[in-house]
Image: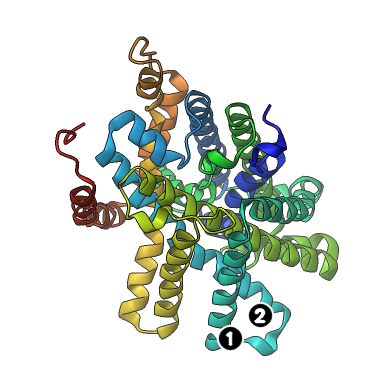
């Protein structure tokens, strides 16, 4: 195992915290209300999608053992398929990260305003949203060690109240709330497909430990372990948490709830329980913001080092942080927040669509990486051995494809257009770095 003096500052606890922190964010807090119209089917889909997420996690763990490369899904796609597919994945994955920041930050602002109603108002909410985004940016600019430590503190602190609801709440549930399997009125396949992106949005981040591989101690062992451990923790919390909330809050109320876990805690333990969960949501939002902020500098940095993104993204600060990538990404997230705050219906609809695309643009890298390990293995071994695709990898690929199907035609169409808009950037960057004789390699 590498010694701490090697300069690599992320160990098993920090990497697991990054995975759990990125997965258990605002999506966890709001998910029971989002899936409530589908009754017991939602619980089944949570479990099925959780199994798919674990299969993808095992795939990423295998990739990390073969080649612990910085950039996660981007790095593995480039190794397996080449520069242009790698660039597309880096572009889409990077967008999915910074487009998710406003959603997480808005959840934070909502809880703070509930604590202090005097702050209610569009301007104050916007200021709180932007403040927490840039506060976390400042933490990450202090270095990867600071970001990893921050993830550990916020993740493990919030696990106490969330874990209490998910586990102790099982003794409080009313089983009469589970009388209907699929009350949505939709056919089973259609309802399952509609649930896929809702649950997948919550599972985004399962690959997080693979991205900052260059800063991970003993990466070949730490990344696989933290990935599987982190996903297992998140899946358990999602499944048990949904069962408890649905078993405590009647579906008619849960569908309209803006704070389902707080409502469940209030029914069990009164105002003190509600307060504890609200504080956990604050920590959850900050922790998720921190983890995604760490990644949104690492992904473009890795692509820039390979000559696929502009060189400015590869520049490191005095603290060895890809500061330019973090600041540019946070600026784009800020623009999204300001567009929403402008209140124009046209701009707001564009904003909602763009944020909705974050799930779609994140799932495409999963599909590419699900079947990549054979090709990565061949690259690493010099082409001497090309192992067969395993059942786990096929399940992970099917999981990603079903989620894309569930996203619907419009997000997939606009997501494809968004990816194709990156082609001029790729051409411009390749022309700048072109060396005669290496074209097509």
Mark 2 Cα within 10 Å, few/some/many (few <14, many 20+)?
A: some
Residue 406 to residue 55: above or below: below
Mark 1 Cα within 10 Å, few/some/many (few <14, many 20+)?
A: some
Q: Are marks 2 and 1 in contact (CB under 8 Å)?
A: yes
**Comes first in the chain, label 2 or label 1:** 2
Q: Position of residue 367 (x, y in %)?
A: 37, 36
Residue found at the very far top of the displayed protein: 384
Residue at position x 53%, y 81% in the image: 126
Q: Is residue 253 left or right of residue 351?
A: right
Q: Position of residue 38 (x, y in %)?
A: 51, 51
Decide if residue 186 is in sight here: no
Residue 346 to residue 380: above or below: below
Residue at position x 60%, y 67% in the image: 138
Name the front one of labels 2 and 1: 1
Q: Position of residue 149 (x, y in %)?
A: 71, 52
Residue at position x 32%, y 55% in the image: 310
* Distance between mark 2 and mark 1 Cα atoms: 9 Å
Please state, as top left, top right, bottom left or bottom right, where the C terminus lies in the image. top left
Residue closer to the observer: 291 or 37: 291
Quarter of the rendering containing residue 224: top right
Q: Determine which residue is flagged by label 1.
A: 124
Q: Determine which residue is flagged by label 2.
A: 113
Q: Which mark is residue 78?
A: none
Q: Is residue 361 left or right of residue 183?
A: left
């Amino acid at each position: 195992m590498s010694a701490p003096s090697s300069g690599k500052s992320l160990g098993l606890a920090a990497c697991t915290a990054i995975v759990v922190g990125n997965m258990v964010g605002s999506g966890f807090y709001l998910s029971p209300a989002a899936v409530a119209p589908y009754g017991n089917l939602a619980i089944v889909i949570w479990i099925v999608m959780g199994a798919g997420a674990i299969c993808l996690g095992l795939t990423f763990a295998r990739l990390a053992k073969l080649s612990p490369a910085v950039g996660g899904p981007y790095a593995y796609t480039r190794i397996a398929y080449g520069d242009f597919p790698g660039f597309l994945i880096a572009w889409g994955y990077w967008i999915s990260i910074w487009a998710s920041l406003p959603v997480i930050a808005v959840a934070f602002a909502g809880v703070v305003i509930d604590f202090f109603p005097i702050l209610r108002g569009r301007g104050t909410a916007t200021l709180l949203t932007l403040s927490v985004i840039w506060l976390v940016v400042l933490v990450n600019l202090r270095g990867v060690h600071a970001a990893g430590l921050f993830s550990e503190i916020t993740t493990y602190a919030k696990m106490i109240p969330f874990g209490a609801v998910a586990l102790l709440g099982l003794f409080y549930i009313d089983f009469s709330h589970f009388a209907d399997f699929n009350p949505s009125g939709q056919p089973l396949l259609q309802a399952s497909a509609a649930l896929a992106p809702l649950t997948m949005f919550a599972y985004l981040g399962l690959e997080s430990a693979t991205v900052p591989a260059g800063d991970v101690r003993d990466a070949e062992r730490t990344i696989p372990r933290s990935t599987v451990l982190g996903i297992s923790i998140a899946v358990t919390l999602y499944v048990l948490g949904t069962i408890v909330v649905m078993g405590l809050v009647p579906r008619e109320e849960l569908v309209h709830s803006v704070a389902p876990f707080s409502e469940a805690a209030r029914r069990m333990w009164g105002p003190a329980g509600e307060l504890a969960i609200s504080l956990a949501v604050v920590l959850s939002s900050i922790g998720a913001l921190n983890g995604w902020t760490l990644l949104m500098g690492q992904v473009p940095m890795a692509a820039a080092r390979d000559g696929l993104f502009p060189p400015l993204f590869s520049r490191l600060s005095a603290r060895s942080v890809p500061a330019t990538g973090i600041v540019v990404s946070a600026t784009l997230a800020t623009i999204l927040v300001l567009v929403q705050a402008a209140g124009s219906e046209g701009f707001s609809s564009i904003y909602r669509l763009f944020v909705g695309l974050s799930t779609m643009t994140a799932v495409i890298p999963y599909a590419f990486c699900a079947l990549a390990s054979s090709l990565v293995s061949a690259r690493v071994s010099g082409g001497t051995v090309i192992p067969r695709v395993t059942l786990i990898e096929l399940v992970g690929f099917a999981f990603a494809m079903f989620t894309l199907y569930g996203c619907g035609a419009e997000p997939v169409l606009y997501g494809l257009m968004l990816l194709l808009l990156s082609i001029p950037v790729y051409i411009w960057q390749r022309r700048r770095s072109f060396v005669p004789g290496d074209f097509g390699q």
